[in-house]
């Protein structure tokens, strides 16, 4: 294969929503979740190679818009993402996103992609990956509190990676629960719809909380959490937005992605800044222990971190090679003489 010319490099592969869905169906949804988890695990195991910074937020009364950047020696990636809880009532998605992957060597983008679907996939893959290290051995039942856009992805990721066979559903909106139950038909999961948060956690070894309201809510109270449970808390992801009663936090061993970000955005914003937490990369690398006791309560305080998006961008970039699941975008000016940008513009008339 010949070396690409600067003109070739000016065409950036773009993965639209339609092509992302085609890619997922071609590979298989559960296979995508498993492969994404492998990419994330691999990148977290080389944690020290990445530039790391908390995401850059712009908050308003309506929600938040954020940039999530990171880079290693070869590639730079960022995600643009919003979070607007009131959007659903207006017929919009609560979260939308797009991302870019670039070559560090010359700064040229090598991928531009939708990340609304991809974020749901990578969030579910990360949750299930960490449950592989933290959930009680042989866990088969997961309770899902909050049955919105993330629900089905989470359930299928836990089925594929952790091995659950039953998901119990509860949402304050019965229509959301009915939607999730319908979507999960035929997946091999036993689906149980519940009428209360107290009922949904009965018999569950894993509890996932995934609600959308931007407030300090108590979705999960202390009396609902018994010994030996793993909590996958993914709904609290910005300042002033939490889901768990503080007493649950003080009883749990807490695991986080990146403490400088999680202490501002996660469940642990309710705790002192020096409250001990364990970082996920340490567990993945074997430098810290995950679950050590059958009666231990483990809590993954997930807020999402840029390296997970970087992993997802790398994954998509690899998967679209030699396929038609993208379209080339002419988004980089490429004059014959790099010094003559004006001449290129002038000649275009």
Image (spheres, helix red, strand yellow):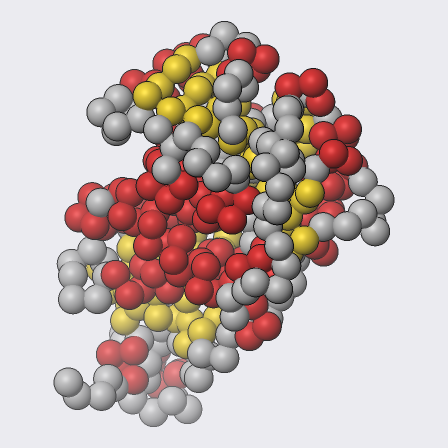
Residue 267, above or below 286: above
Residue 106 picture quarter: bottom left
Residue 227, position in %: x, y? 64, 28
| Tally of numbered discs | 0
Q: Nearer the viewer, residue 190 or 315?
A: 190
Q: Quadrant of the N terminus?
A: bottom left
Identify which residue, 210 or 155, lies in the foreground. Answer: 155
Task: Report whether 272 appears left or right of 122.
Answer: right
Q: Nearer the viewer, residue 39 or 11?
A: 39
Relative height, residue 106 to residue 139 (above, below): below
- Residue 134 location in percent, x, y? 55, 44
Does the image show residue 277? yes
Residue 224 at x, y percent in the picture: 64, 19
Q: State the residue at coordinates (37%, 54%).
A: 36
Q: Quadrant of residue 60?
A: top right
Front residue of 119 and 246: 246
Residue 297 percent coordinates (x, y): 64, 35
Where, by quadrant of the figure, is residue 99 drawn?
A: bottom left
The residue that appears at 56% across and 63% down in the rendered structure is 286
Reply above or below: 308 against 162: below
Quadrant in which the C terminus appears: bottom left
The residue at 41%/30% (across/down) is 140
Q: Residue at x 72, y 56 (%)?
A: 260
């Amino acid at each position: 294969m010949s070396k690409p010319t600067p003109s070739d490099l000016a065409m950036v592969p773009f993965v639209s929503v339609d092509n992302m869905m085609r890619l997922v169906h071609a590979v298989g949804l559960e296979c995508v979740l498993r492969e994404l988890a492998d990419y994330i695990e691999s990148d977290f195991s080389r944690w020290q190679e990445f530039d790391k910074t908390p995401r850059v937020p712009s908050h308003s009364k309506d929600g938040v818009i954020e940039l999530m950047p990171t880079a290693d020696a070869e590639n730079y990636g960022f995600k643009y993402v919003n979070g607007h809880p009131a959007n659903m009532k207006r017929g919009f998605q609560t979260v939308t996103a797009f991302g870019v992957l670039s070559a560090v060597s010359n700064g040229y983008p090598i991928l531009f992609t939708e990340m609304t679907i991809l974020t749901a996939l990578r969030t579910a893959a990360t949750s299930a990956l960490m449950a592989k290290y933290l959930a009680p051995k042989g866990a088969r039942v997961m309770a899902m509190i909050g049955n919105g856009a993330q629900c089905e992805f989470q359930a299928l990721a836990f089925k594929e990676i952790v091995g659950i066979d039953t998901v119990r559903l509860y949402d304050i909106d019965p229509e959301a629960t009915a939607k999730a139950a319908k979507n999960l038909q035929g997946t091999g999961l036993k689906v149980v719809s519940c009428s209360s948060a107290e009922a949904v956690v009965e018999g569950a070894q894993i509890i996932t909380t995934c609600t959308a309201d931007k407030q300090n809510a108590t979705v999960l109270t202390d009396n609902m959490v018994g010994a030996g449970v793993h909590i996958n808390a993914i709904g609290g992801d910005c300042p002033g937005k939490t889901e768990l009663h503080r007493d649950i936090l003080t009883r749990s061993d807490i695991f986080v992605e990146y403490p400088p970000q999680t202490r501002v955005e996660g469940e642990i914003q309710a705790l002192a800044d020096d409250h001990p937490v364990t970082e996920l990369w340490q567990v993945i690398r074997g430098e810290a222990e995950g679950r050590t006791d059958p009666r231990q309560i483990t809590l993954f305080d997930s807020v999402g971190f840029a390296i997970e998006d970087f992993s997802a961008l790398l994954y998509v970039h690899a998967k679209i090679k030699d396929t038609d699941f993208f379209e080339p975008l002419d988004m980089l000016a490429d004059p014959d003489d790099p010094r003559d940008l004006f001449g290129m513009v002038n000649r275009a008339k």
